[in-house]
Amino acid sequence: MSTKPAPVAVALDAQDLDTALRWAEQTGPYVSTIKVGLELYLKHGAQAVQRTREASGGRDLFLDLKLHDIPNTVAGAARGVAALRPTYLTVHASGGAAMIRAAVEALPQTRIAAVTVLTSLSEADLSAVGLIGPPLDAARRLAALAVAAGARAIVCSPREVAAVRAEVGPDVTLITPGVRPPGAAHGDQTRVATPEQALADGADLLVIGRPITGAADPAAAAREIGAALARWAAPGPPKVDDPCGDGGESARLLEECE
Ligand SMILES: O=C(O)c1cc(=O)[nH]c(=O)n1[C@@H]1O[C@H](COP(=O)(O)O)[C@@H](O)[C@H]1O
């Protein structure tokens, strides 16, 4: 059993601070990072960040505020959270180059992470909002734009991470939500893959919420995911789980065996 923190950001998506604190404490030993997002931050603010970080044992902080506004406002918002010293802060890449650069310049010690195409959106959802074509094309285009504007991290679906890696090179941190262990419910996520596949395709950090926090025992769930990733990283086959039980033929994407 591995107890080394896995490259996982556990999403503490709760409105109840005690619940978030419990999750942070339970999962902290097994994950590298805690993610505080809109649900917790808007209800409890900076104290939720400080307290969950403490409860996690001082894990890295991924502050997921998905800023998306004019450059001046985003710069001000980024400066407003500077005291929290987040490792990562998210902005929407579709806010454009000037907005991304404003965040980067406002918070030079933080890796500004540009969100490309939300993992909940299908190709049909995208075309309904006027983005015609496969999500992969938009993700690649937005990632290139964001990195050129100074973003040092990109958030994308694990389905697109290999193409995004090819686009932005080795030095950018690639973060993938939409990660589901074999058999886990997808919920509102559409473009998903397994933790092992996401790493195999080049992800540096996996964002995982409900498969951990929705488990009867979040500590055990986080530990199990970490152990599976450690097994995967160990030398020798097999390298990718076989959730379909077909010898790996359709192991690449979970939906192919559902
Ligand atoms: O920026 C994010 O973290 C993010 C981007 C994205 O495209 N999709 C996405 O699900 N997320 C976040 O990742 C987490 C995923 O949670 P689960 O679906 O419960 O694993 C949530 O906190 C989302 O806000």
Image (spheres, rainbow, N blue to C red):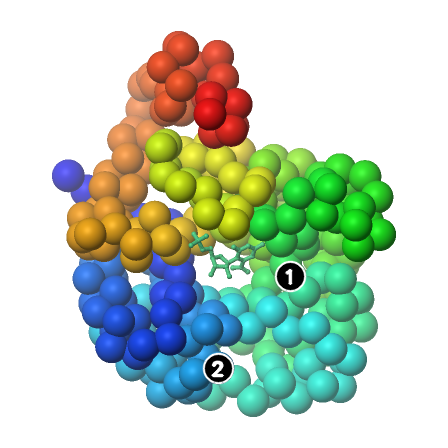
Image position, residue 169 (x, y; %): 65, 44
Query: Circle 1 sits in a helix, a strand or a loop, which is it?
Result: strand
Label count reads 2
Point out residue 221 in the picture as x, y percentages from the top left corner.
24, 47
The CA span between labels 1 and 2 is: 20 Å
Q: Please name the residue shown 71% across and 61% down the image.
A: 93
Q: In which quarter of the image is the N terminus?
A: top left
Q: Does residue 244 show up?
A: yes
Q: In this view, does 220 lie to the left or right of 189?
A: left
In front: 224, or 211?
Answer: 211
Dot 2 crowding, Cα within 10 Å, few <14, some 14–19, many 20+: few
Q: Name which residue type carries label 2.
A: Leu
Which marked residue is nearer to the observer: mark 1 or mark 2? 2
Q: Give the residue pinned by disc 2.
A: 42
Disc nearer the start of the sequence (1/2): 2
Quarter of the image for residue 122 reads: top right
- Picture coordinates of residue 75 (x, y %)? 68, 83
Q: Name the one closer to the observer, 94 or 14.
A: 14
Give the residue pinned by disc 1.
Answer: 114
Viewer can see residue 152:
no
Q: For mark 1, does the 10 Å Cα neighbourhood hold few (<14), some (14 to 19), or many (20 or more) residues?
A: many
